[in-house]
Amino acid sequence: MCEGRATKAATGSSARFTRLGASLHLRLALTIAALLITVSSAFGVVTHPVITSINPSTVIAGSSDFTLQVTGANFQDNCAVLVNGAPHPTTFVDSSHLTSTVLQEEVASPGNLSITVLNPNQDVSSPVTLQVLPNSPTISSISPSSVAVHGPSFTLRVNGSNFDSTAVVKVNNSARSTTFVDSSTLNAAILSTDITSTGTDNIRVSNPNNHDSNVVTLTVTANATPAITTLDPSTVNAGSQPFTLSVLGTNFASGAAVKINGATRSTTFVSSTKLTAGVVTSDLASPGSLAVTVTNPGGAVSAPATLTVTSATQPTITSISPNTVTGGTNGFTLSIVGTNYVAGASAKVNASARSTTFVDAQHLTATILRSDIATAGTLSITVTNPGASGETSNSMPLTVVFANSPVITSLDPLGLPSGSPATKILVNGTGFDVTDTVFVNAAAHPTEFVSATQLAVTLSADDLASPTTLSITVAHTTGEVSGPATFNVSDASGPLISSISPSSVSVGGAGFTMTVIGENFDTQAVVSVDTTPRTTQFISTAQLTTVINASDLTTARNVPIAVINAGGVTSPSVNLAVGVNPPAISSVRPTTVIAGDVGFTLTVSGSGFSDASIINVNGTTKTTTFNSGAGTLTAAITADDIATPGTLFVTVTDSGLTSSAARVTVLQPNILSINPVGIAAGSGDTTLVVSGAAFLTTSKIVFLGTDRATTFTGATGTLSTTLTATDLASAGDFGVSVRNSPTATSQPFILHVVNPGDPRIDRLSPSFVIAGTSSADIHVIGGNFLPGSLVQANGFQRPTQYVSSSELIVSLNSAQLVNPGALPIVVVNPDASRSFAVNLQIASTAPPARRRPAGH
């Protein structure tokens, strides 16, 4: 069985298992576990296990037994790792981590092994491939392929195939410290002594048992021209305090100097792609543009990059909350966090001013109008200070989504180092459908549905090739798209935050200790909160803790969290969401109403409701009552709201946050049958009875385009009216409809008015037969039947018994009754006059008894 606890105790060579016996034991245990869980599974939805990664994902043929680490979600105790469908002894670590042993004989030859996880309820994950590669390493490229002579030590990336986890990179046959990334990527530490003269160095890879790759050359050039790609920050305020500028780019050499407007500044070499430099007070004295360059030893100079110095009083926006809202809902108050706000500052939506409240120099609130968020899209939020200069901040996007759009709450992980291989990440949220697609920077990516609150998406190696930020969204097939979530791809050598705990808290909460999980943290690393370094406890290179104060939580906003290593190397920031928990609807009552009915009280159950909650119906706010005892909301739904068939989309808005939509179906009246279905022309007044669904006591039968005096019979749920002799004067086919309101009318049902003397079918008894019945005698009830009248079924004459002028009996055989559907029945008299057709229903199962909607 998935040993859970038992396997944990069985370690070392003494715990090696007998292959076949262990496999049979495991299969038996899984079967027993599946039986034990059957009852509990019947009472809830069991989410499928999903594998996001395995480690290792590749091995070299001939490797010894090894431990396979499986990472994912929804793993259950007593689950099993399957290798090519065969269960293996498995250690359950937690619901997202397993370990298992892969045997030497399973990786003896090159090929692919299929890895899956089987939960006790027999749910199986999608397979992930473990590649068994030939022991024949091959180098396809190296990066960099050339370096400047007399440069510093650096990391060489070796790309190729069939690299073993213990492979070693050699420079001119001398081994160098090597880091295994995956079977196609190695990182090697190249020494400064390797590049002391111009020329070439031979690079090769050695696998175990002295299997060597081809040789590629690393060119050592006389000079390399540095290039700047990014400045961080790229904009600062005039009059700011001196600070450390990060300069990112390529071909930086040890001893390189950063210059600002031609003046050399104190420079620290971090790597060939990163420098830091001290910006001094005189650089920041007045607004303007500063030219930043890098000069390598030997004189090679980069093209300039621009550091913008803005007015010291220019406002900035660092975050807004909420940053995603539901379109078509009520207006709300937007919280704006930034710097340099003054009394009289004006927040603007797409350059149009909105009512703004000054809180302090870092906080404003603004009234967002309902008309601003009437449709889905992106709004530009800016802040303009008062005065002659009218200085305006940077722009911050406010995303407006559809009422029934999916919602992303978090990503797991939040980021990866650049150069990572293709990786599956989890997208957490609400309102996900099985047909949803995850988009990365607007490009559709392979998506796996896990549950209504979780998707998995595969980021490609190209997505993760270089430092950047990726915008993640989820889209329904019907066009609704979530707001964006940000995924960080960081410099592989710098610190990276993969998660924070907690990741969201409520406004006004107490202070707490935050745990920061990631990689490449050094012993001097500090966590910055709102760009301010905090006292930090170093736990490991993958974990830090710091204290978040109650004062950090006084307003709704996103608080940026980053990690700063010694030397100023800083991770991409992630957000601690401080806000009001969004409302969530668990159910509405009723879920079905009839179009054209009177108004009713809608009851909404869920969480996150308060006295400030507002029920919205198809985007229109309703006067809402909060029942604190029951935790429910109620609102009056008017007759106008349900006059037309369709769907009511119900949402709840509280403190500017809107829930996902629940649905109330507004039913259209529907005629199932009429009695009689045929009347002889020239008949006197005749009662017409209409049966169907979604009828009201106020429903009207419509005949010849006019509403008729109609009686609703509560015991049967039917409608009836009197057709006059004038209505029936002429032969023809006439539509009968039911109208509940001017905009709620059923599809027409045909009443046949036939010539006197022509055969007429009023009804069939029985009216349906189960498909596959061997034979059936059907009573055809009507009028003007004659001895010699014959019944046709689907155009084929069938044996017919004449009972009376109003009744015939037709015999049907298995050929007419084999398939579900409608079988048209027609009576033909000896004079060749024909009745209209009436359908005999061939049903797969017996139709349910007709029921009237509750309350009608």
Image (cartoon, rainbow, N blue to C red):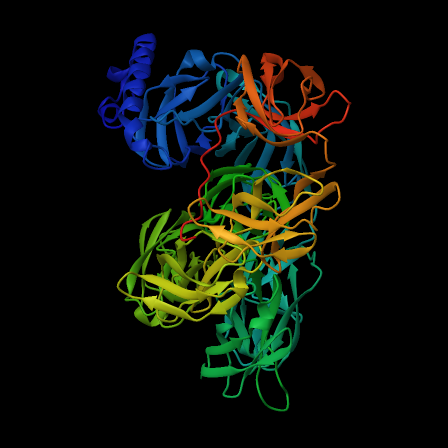
Of residues 578 and 264, which is closer to you in this image?
578
Residue drawn 51% across and 82% down?
356
Residue drawn 34% across and 13% down?
23
Residue drawn 59% across and 47% down?
440
The image quarter in which residue 35 lies: top left
- Picture coordinates of residue 758, whole percent (x, y): 72, 31
Of residues 552 and 380, which is closer to you in this image?
380
Relative to 406, is 798 on the left or the right? Answer: right
- Picture coordinates of residue 250, whole percent (x, y): 63, 51
Of residues 346 and 467, which is closer to you in this image?
346
Quadrant of the frame with the N terminus: top left
Q: Residue reaching furthest bottom?
A: 388
- Picture coordinates of residue 590, whole percent (x, y): 42, 54
Of residues 2 and 549, which is closer to you in this image?
2
- Picture coordinates of residue 358, whole percent (x, y): 47, 83
Residue 579 at least partly seen: no
Relative to 619, is 513 on the left or the right? Answer: left
Q: Residue reaching furthest right?
A: 832
Location of residue 542 with respect to 400 vertically, above or below: above
